[in-house]
Image (spheres, helix red, strand yellow):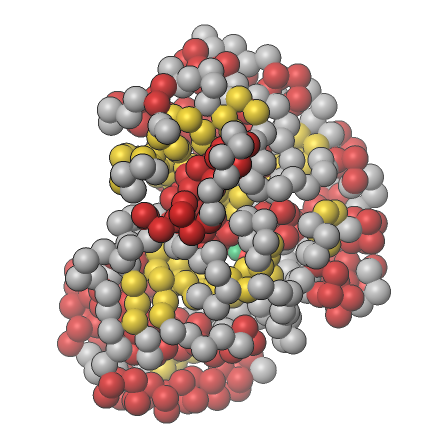
Amino acid sequence: MGNFLGIDASTQSLTGLVIDPVTGQIVAEESVNFDEHFSHRYGVANGVIDLGDGVVHSPPLMWVEALEILFRQLDASGVKMASIDAVAGSGQQHGTVYLNMSAAGVLGGLRADMDLSEQLRDIFSRATAPVWMDTSTREQCTQIEEGVGGRQRLLDLTGNTAFERFSGPQIRKFAQTEPEAYERTASICLVSSFMTSLLAGRLVPVDAGDASGTNLMDIRQRRWSPDALAATADGLNRRLLPVIDADSVVGPISPFWVERYGLAATCQVLPFSGDNPCSLIGLGLVQPGQMALSLGTSDTFFACMDQVRTSDSGEGALFASPDGEHYMALICFLNGSLAREAVRDQYGLNWAEFAETLRRTEPGNDGRLMLPYFDAEIVPHVTAAGVIRENLDKGDVAGNVRAVVEAQAMSSRIHAEWMGIQVQSVSVTGGASSSEDILQVYADVHNCQVHRFQTTNAAALGAALRAVHGLARAQGTPMSWEDVVDPFIQPEAGSTISPRPEAVSRYTECVEAYRALEQRHTG
Ligand code: XUL
């Protein structure tokens, strides 16, 4: 067995992670930050273009360029490209990429002597892709829910009520507001399936894990729901390829990557899935009842489940697990690292000072609370930015630092109640998971141990592990999910964070105070 590559196409960067499944080692991890490379050329900040009024897009051509840079970086880091047996990936969820009828032909005839971005420049019917941070589709959400026979029906059918960021409402808005461009659209990809298509050199369908984030897939059948398609846009069925199993091999990598970067012609491509479904695998959540936290651009808190369970309030999301068998319950906080960064910047701190401030302040923050809506929020549903402070002065640096982190941790506890899981431990990933001080707050608020791992990028790791599992199955030597994930999910020695009894009892009260404050302002 050789090496396996997992690629994570996230909001702010593109990461490649190479694993050796035999030794259980991460062989290489390289990242391309979009702002560093592209802020001028594509006008992105934090990887996105904020067009105002809740409209947030990213240019897909930027992801194309980043993919080539990533392969160059991996090569320069010493990875033997020919040793990669298979590649799979992970993409920020919900974002949609709109392609015209030339796309399939161009992808199939890629030339290795030209940049990928140069060749793909004209395949788009829409230059930019709405991403998960876009909150501009409230109207379309209501229309889709009504179109399928009500909110509850959409929830029963797809596992989710209509969310502004989900692909279906975004597609509907495009079809309504730019009908000519929609007419010119031959195929609609998600970020995940777009990236897979670049590697495979042909249009590849969406996997069931990411398709669950569209408001278009029948969650039990794992295929597009005719009712949801009809309620979303005319002619949508022919613009979407049928949903595929995340575990299926799509085919060999395009000769473009073989000739240009030395990958083996036998290297197999498996579908990208959503970043959260991939993190589920990367954190080893392949059995029901386990919980994990991802502290990224968004913060997500999620669990593996063995049956469909939806949140009555409609704020939680449900996805199909890419393990092909289970489900993933998730809550997504838009004000994740962006809120922590906003506080850090507001008070001119660096991360070390931010952490030091957390360390010297008391759990419970002496009753100083914050609702950290630096931007509109997904959970709970808040339509416009507006930070609320209680017993907390805006000039109180230490109080604000602790308040933003405590708010995020308490909100994750309150809004995960619908999952009905007795939290035993939390596995954690994402950039901010390197901060012990932030994680201590989560351990205290949830009264459980918090585990950290070799990499903070569980999405890329999960993608690589999916490649191992899928290829073994395709080769007729199937492996259990446990055997695939186990070598990579041993907590880092000495890195587990335990709850402190005094802090735990203080948070029992604080959580109720936070709940009451939140209900007063959002309820
Ligand atoms: C999940 C969500 C985000 C994105 C970006 O529903 O919207 O977590 O996947 O990472």
Q: Is residue 310 found left or right of 323 in the rendered image?
A: right
- Whether residue 204 is visible: yes
Q: Residue furthest top?
A: 113
Residue 349 appears in which quarter of the rendering?
Answer: bottom left
Instruction: Please give the name of the residue rendered at 52% of the width and 18% of the height, measured from the top-left corner.
Output: 254
What is the x, y in percent for residue 251? Answer: 57, 25
Nearer the observer, 412 or 245: 245
Image quadrant occupied by the N terminus: top left
What is the x, y in percent for residue 168? Answer: 70, 50
Disc count in the image? 0
Instruction: Please give the name of the residue rendered at 48% of the width and 61% of the height, measured from the top-left corner.
Output: 287
Q: Is residue 149 above or below residue 487?
A: below
Nearer the observer, 504 or 477: 477
Q: Is residue 190 found left or right of 257 in the rendered image?
A: right
Residue 3 appears in which quarter of the rendering?
Answer: top left
What is the x, y in percent for residue 367? Answer: 32, 88
Instruction: Please give the name of the residue rendered at 42% of the width and 17% of the height, measured from the top-left corner.
Output: 264
